[in-house]
Amino acid sequence: MGLELFLVTDKEYTWLAGGWERLRSEVRERLRVPEPTAVLFIDGFCSYCRLTGETLRRLDWRGRLEVVSFREDDRFRRLGLSAEALELRMHLVEPRSGRVFAGFDAVEALALRMLSLWPLLPLLWLARASGQGQRLYDFLASRRLIVPDARACGEGACAVPARAAAEER
């Protein structure tokens, strides 16, 4: 390893690094599917959800996953999903087959369809086998921080759900 310092010049190292990037982008482009084969609906008001969605986009080497905030895109209505259900759990929809996965099932379906997530499969299997998978997902989802986007609020104020107002009393 230390011998590389003496044998590879900076110019050669830069050329090698650029070649690796070119190869990587070429492989990604050749593996890319023309249209997404699954749509993941997340909560765009949740910073953790947005970060998760962005991470999944980067890990999706084949471009088969489309990550969408249900707060900004109402396609979920055409698929028969409700905003209330999407507020509780993320949903993964396969448009061709019409299959819908929610919560922990969506996490498992994502791990199965994305090679980069396969190392998580044994942990997900254990969570499922112990009966704790959905419970753990719901625990984490109930503690996410929701910060409304200013563009979603009309006339300088955001609507407060009646349930939240009643809980404060």
Image (cartoon, helix red, strand yellow):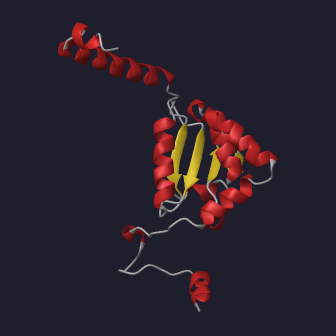
Q: Quadrant of the N terminus?
A: top left
Looking at the image, which residue sits at the far front?
2
What is the number of callouts on the image?
0
Q: Is residue 31 visible?
A: yes
Image quarter of residue 115: top right
Nearer to me, 129 or 88 = 129
Q: Position of residue 37 (x, y in %)?
A: 60, 36
Looking at the image, which residue sits at the far top?
7
Tell me the residue at 74%/48% (across/down): 127
Q: Position of residue 145 (x, y in %)?
A: 50, 67
Q: Is residue 72 visible?
A: no
- From the viewer's perspective, is residue 145 above or below residue 64? below
Nearer to me, 74 or 70 = 70
Tell me the residue at 71%/48% (across/down): 105
- From the viewer's perspective, is residue 65 above or below residue 2? below
Tell me the residue at 18%/14% (across/down): 11
Q: Quadrant of the C terminus?
A: bottom right
Tell me the residue at 64%/68% (across/down): 84
Q: Position of residue 85 (x, y in %)?
A: 66, 64
Nearer to me, 96 or 107 = 107
29 left or right of 168 in image? left
